[in-house]
Image (tube, rainbow, N blue to C red):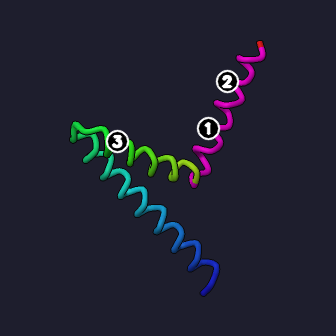
């Protein structure tokens, strides 16, 4: 198994995970209950932990919040 295969596999996993989360988001928004909303929030939190872009955004937001608290 080469490195290219590993990268390709990881890309596919992330793509399908994102697709499932997107589909679940549509279904959750269509239902009136809060139980499924809580479950989806946990899944999205895991996706945010894996995402590099979101991690940078969250880090910047935390820095801005901490600067506001200091002033």
Judged left or right of residue 25, residue 2 is right
Cα–Cα gap, marks 3 and 2: 27 Å
Judged left or right of residue 67, residue 35 is left
The residue indicated by pointer 1 is 57
Main secondary structure along the magenta-highlighted residues: helix
Provide residue 61's location: percent of width, then percent of height. 64, 30
Q: Residues within 10 Å of mark 3 (few under 14, many from 20)?
A: some
Where 62 falls versus 30 (above or below)? above
Write the start and end of the magenta stretch as one range. Answer: 50-70
Taking the spot 35% from the left edge, 58% from the top edge, the residue there is 20
Residue 65's mark?
2
Q: Is residue 66 magenta?
A: yes
> Mark 3, mark 2: which one is toward the viewer?
3
Q: Is mark 2 on a helix, strand or loop?
A: helix
Provide residue 68's location: percent of width, then percent of height. 71, 17
> Mark 1, mark 3: which one is toward the viewer?
3
Taking the spot 72% from the left edge, 29% from the top edge, the residue there is 63
């Amino acid at each position: 198994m080469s490195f290219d295969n590993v990268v390709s596999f990881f890309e596919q996993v992330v793509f399908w995970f994102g697709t499932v989360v997107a589909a679940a988001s549509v279904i959750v928004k269509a239902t009136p209950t809060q139980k499924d909303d809580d479950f989806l929030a946990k899944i999205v939190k895991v996706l945010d932990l894996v995402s590099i872009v979101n991690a940078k955004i969250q880090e910047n937001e935390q820095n801005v919040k901490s600067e506001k608290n200091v002033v």
